[in-house]
Image: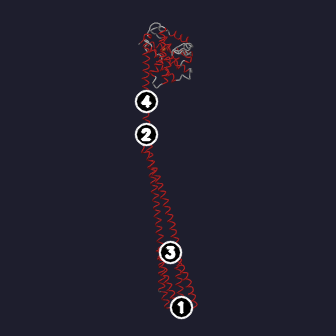
Amino acid sequence: MQSMKKIPFKIFITILIAGVIGILGEIILKYHMDKLLDNYEEIIYEHTVNRDYMNDIRVMLYEHQALVAHHVMAVEESQMKEYEQREEEISVKLTNTLSEFGKRMNTDEREQLYHKVYSNYYSYLNNARVAIALSEEGKDGAARYYLTGSMADFVEKVNSDLDNLDILSVNEMNEAKTRMEYYISISVLSQFICILGIAIATVVSVVYCYRIAKNLDRYKDNLEKEVEKKTKTIRENSERMISYQNSTIIGMANLIESRDGNTGEHVKRTSYYVELLAKEAKRRGLYSDILTDDYIELLVKATPLHDIGKIVVSDKILQKPGKLTPQEYEIIKLHAKEGGKVIQNVIGDIDENEYVAMASDVATYHHEKWDGSGYNEGLKGEEIPLCARIMALADVFDALVSKRVYKEAMPVDEAFKIIQESSGTHFDPKLAEVFLELRPDIEACFFENMQNVAQV
Ligand SMILES: [Fe+2]
């Protein structure tokens, strides 16, 4: 996964570098193209101007040749003078034009061709002067010989040299054009390669990103499944641990109770009464800031441990059939105080702190009385934890109607009467009222339980 994460970054860098190289290449090519274009335009301009010069030279040369011919053919002296004067003017003009044209020769090759032009022109001019001189002397035959012979040859040579200069310019133009076409081809090719490279890199990047996204989804799914599996295992272990704890607690409570001569039914019944009373009190809105579903669940679970402190009381006292002496009663009373300590020592290290605190309160304070006459701290009213006040009602009622080694079972009517009479002295009056009103359910539970015990 780690190496795959780096791939899009590498591709991004590749695209960036390709883009930068492409842009730089384009800038360099454009610079060269601009230079070539300027050069090409300059060559075309030079060629055009040179052609104008060459046309002028050709025209003036033919005009000069015609004037010499007219001079040779002229009969009157005045005509000869006129042609001679015009010939001189045009030869000066032609010489000046050739000199200006010579200054435009910007390469060695051109300069060499120009010198040939000028040399042949100079030869032509000398022959023309000879022809004029012969004409003036009346030697028209010889003059015609120069006119149609050497003069015509040199004119032809001058024209041929000018043609060579023209061909040179055309060749230069073609070369410049070829170079430009070459650079244009390179530019188009480089643009194509650049675009193709970026396109390929983009496609590869998209494919890799897609693959990474798919791998991430798969990884996420696997992780979720793994977490779900672990959570399930933890929950199962936790539930198993709670089940073991509950079994241990119930076992300890039954063990304590068995020392008192009971069969474990007291634990079951008191748990039922506690649950019944707590739920009804909650339904009626009593102590709504304390009585929540979680609170009731913990209370029912803590109920079996209310007498766990009896572990410090000897069997001799617990199983004594007769009335206890004041000293023995004081020892019995110790079970409440010791119950809280035992709970803290035995189950104090489990994770459920609220449960430990509640079990400790139930064990420590279930013999406190509403009027403050109970033990072991003499708390009164709502100073007594609510869980212990609920426990007290269930515990006392069940103790009254149950047979013990030291007493017979009290009739249910009488037990309810005692509960009623003890409301506000022993018991929380609000809870006692609810308990009394729950009599049908409590009796049903009690008689069904007695029946089961009898059958056993
Ligand atoms: Fe007790």
Separation (CA) of disc 1 from disc 3: 38 Å
Residue at horizontal 43%, vertical 22%? 245
Q: Which residue is mark 1?
A: 136
Q: Residues within 10 Å of mark 1 (few under 14, many from 20)?
A: some
Going from N to C along the chain, the mark reached first, 4 or 2, is 2
SS at mark 3? loop
Circle 2 SS class: helix
| Percent x, y of residue 196 | 45, 55
How far apart are the two marked residues, 2 and 1, measured between alpha carbons?
116 Å
Q: Of 53 and 373, which appears nearest the observer?
A: 373
Mark sitting earlier along the chain (1/3): 3
Tag 4 residue: 234
Q: Quadrant of the C terminus?
A: top left
- The residue singled out by tag 3 in the image is 105
Q: To which residue does mark 2 refer?
A: 219
In this rendering, the answer to whether 146 lies above or below 21 is: below
Mark 4, mark 3: which one is toward the viewer? 3
**How far, Cα to Cα, is label 4 from label 2?**
22 Å
- Identify which amino acid the numbered label 4 is placed on: Ile
Disc 3 crowd rating (10 Å Cα; few below 14, some 14-19, many 20+) is: some
Q: Are marks 1 and 4 in contact (CB under 8 Å)?
A: no
Residue 150 against residue 352 in the figure, above or below? below
Label 3 CB-ligand 1 distance < 8 A: no
In the shown orientation, is residue 345 left or right of residue 423? left
